[in-house]
Amino acid sequence: MMTSSDNTQAILWEGDHLRLLDQRLLPQRVVYLDITDVKTAADAITDMVVRGAPAIGITAAYAIVLAAGQRYREDAANWRSLIESDLQYLAASRPTAINLFWAIGRMRERMASLSANPVNVLLDEAIAIHEEDIAANKKMGELGAALINANAGVLTHCNAGALATGGYGTALGVIRSASAAGKLRQVYADETRPWLQGARLTAWELLQDHIPVTLIVEGAAAALMQTGAVQWFIVGSDRIAANGDVANKIGTYAGAILAKHHGLKVMVVAPTSTIDMNVASGADIPIEARDGAEILSLNKQVVAAEGSGAWNPVFDVTPAALIDAIVTEKGVVERPDAAKMAALMAS
């Protein structure tokens, strides 16, 4: 399967196994890992080999294919009972990205009616999830780009591109579409500590598609906005609550506050699989925290004073009141609130 950007294929199914682009090594090295069992796939999600909510969901779907094959070989009569521990292990890999649980739920529903060897049917379902995500990204790219005026400057945070999705991207999908339409004057990307997804991944990905990008440290965002060089702050999301609050990479909330102060518009781009209507507001979204060593060091080189503590939340919540538009494959929700989100999901 090819993603929509041939240069940034993060997730591949080849024959009887999964291949993941090891995003921890970009941009210095392009290395694919061959994944043949569900535990290795789940660990790859936890260890940031693959990241981004849609990509995590797609990876989980393929991982379930691997699990089903293994459990069916072990016990053809009881494979559905045996696979439950695999699903639980997979679900524990990243707690904030709702696409993970959405994909597990969809694959579980598909399994419910199967009695014979499940591999081919589940593989078809995983491929459908993958292809649907690419199609959704392209649609969101068109819808989001339509909101942007000509000669615009945009700032993005973290990586919400082909690497974080099935292909093309959410926030970067909008940027790709706007660039193709000749609307963009300049793209800026926050470097995004502590994993440097902006510097390592977003910059690399855009340059693969010949879209010029300028990196900034997050601390420079206010100064950049003050110059008038950017008109939009465009990001993806890992979970959107029923009222339109958005959980995304740590630093998104700060960027949205700065954008509002400087008169920029804020666009969140995410498929409807990222919307969790069972969570009333952002206050109810579980926020993953990772090892503080990630911010006490950089590429395994200690950068902090010995003995320093560290607080390392991976995500923050941006209130709906700070968001001008949530762009999904079903349509655009401007100035989101609970009623508008419910109408979108009912459409």
Image (cartoon, grey):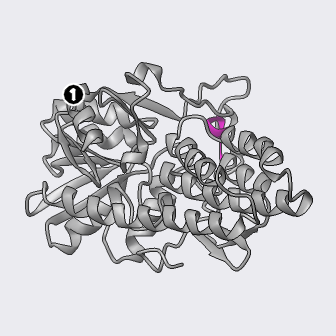
**Tag 1, which secondary structure?**
helix
Residue under the point 65% across and 39% down: 294
Mark 1: few/some/many CA within 10 Å (<14, 14-19, 20+): few
Q: Position of residue 117 (x, y in %)?
A: 76, 66
Residue under the point 8% across and 58% down: 149
- Would you identify the image quadrant in which residue 33 lies? bottom right
Q: Position of residue 82 (x, y in %)?
A: 83, 46
Query: In the displayed structure, does residue 71 sit left or right of residue 311?
Result: right
- Residue span colored magenta: 294-298
Q: Nearer the viewer, residue 282 or 217?
A: 282
Main secondary structure of the magenta stretch: helix
Amino acid type for the residue under numbered disc 1: Ala
Residue 27 appears anywhere in the view: no
Magenta highlight on residue 297: yes
Task: Give above or below for 284 relative to 100.
Answer: above
Q: Nearer the viewer, residue 126 or 208?
A: 126
Q: Position of residue 178 (x, y in %)?
A: 20, 66
Magenta highlight on residue 248: no
Residue carrying label 1: 339
- Would you identify the image quadrant in which residue 223 lies? top left
Quarter of the image with the C terminus in it: top left
Query: In the displayed structure, does residue 338 sit left or right of residue 203?
Result: left
